[in-house]
Image (spheres, helix red, strand yellow):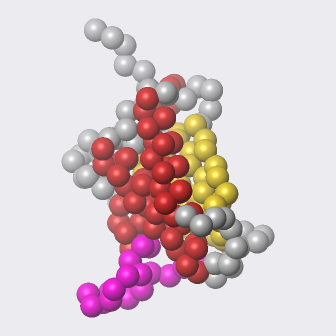
Amino acid sequence: MPAVVPKDELLVGGPILSAMALDGSEPIAGARRAASGFMTEVQAVHGLPVSDRAMTMVELVVSELVTNAYKYAPGPCLLELEVRAGVVEISVWDTAAQLPAVSAADPSRIGQHGLEIAMAVCRSFEVRREPVGKRVKVTIGLADDPGGDQAGRLF
């Protein structure tokens, strides 16, 4: 029977990182492609298990956060992805100092659900001001929750 290696030991050399500046004609599509490629590399090159749910949720959350950055902040944004201890941390920095707020529930509202989506599918959600602009940081579990919670959210 093969030995089971704890997830933290798989990252002995440190976390797996990717960062990209987004300032172009297709930043949202580029961010989705970058996230998908990063998660594929985490699985194929680094050998870490990544559930289908995690692959899909990372791409969705990156899309929502980068869309918000481009919609509400002037200038470029920075996308950072980091895998450590069984999670992927997604960080999006932009130039706007105003912190985002989730809109009040309104079933007739079209759009403006990005933060609601991110908060619903992520294990953690954090927004903080930076010396310039702000940073939104979320985490998503790489494997499905053993308790059966497909969103992987911790309460």
Query: Is residue 125 at all visible to an observer of this figure?
Result: no
User: Residue 103 at what x, y percent from top left?
Assistant: 42, 86
Apparent side of residue 67 relative to residue 49 in the rendered image (left or right): right
- Residue 107 at x, y percent in the picture: 26, 87
Residue 24 lies, in percent from the top left, at 63, 64
Q: Quadrant of residue 17?
A: top right
User: Which residue, as the protein is rendered here, is positioned at the far right?
Assistant: 131
Q: Is residue 50 left or right of residue 77?
A: left
Expressed as whole percent of the image width and height from the top left, the position of residue 76 reads 68, 68
Q: Quadrant of the N terminus?
A: top left
In the rendered image, is residue 4 in sight? Answer: yes
Q: Is residue 34 above or below residue 85?
A: below
Inspect the magenta stretch and tell me whether residue 56 lies in it: no
Magenta segment, prevailing SS (helix, strand or loop): loop
As for residue 108 lying within the magenta part, the answer is: yes
Q: Quadrant of the C terminus?
A: bottom left
Q: Residue at x 35, y 66 (%)?
A: 120
Residue at point 67% right, 57% down?
21
Q: Nearer the viewer, residue 136 or 126?
A: 136
Looking at the image, is 147 positioned above or below residue 14?
Answer: below
Q: Is residue 17 above or below residue 110?
A: above
- Name the residue at the top extreme: 1
Q: Quadrant of residue 2?
A: top left
Bounds of the magenta segment: 99-115
In front of the other: 146 or 130: 130
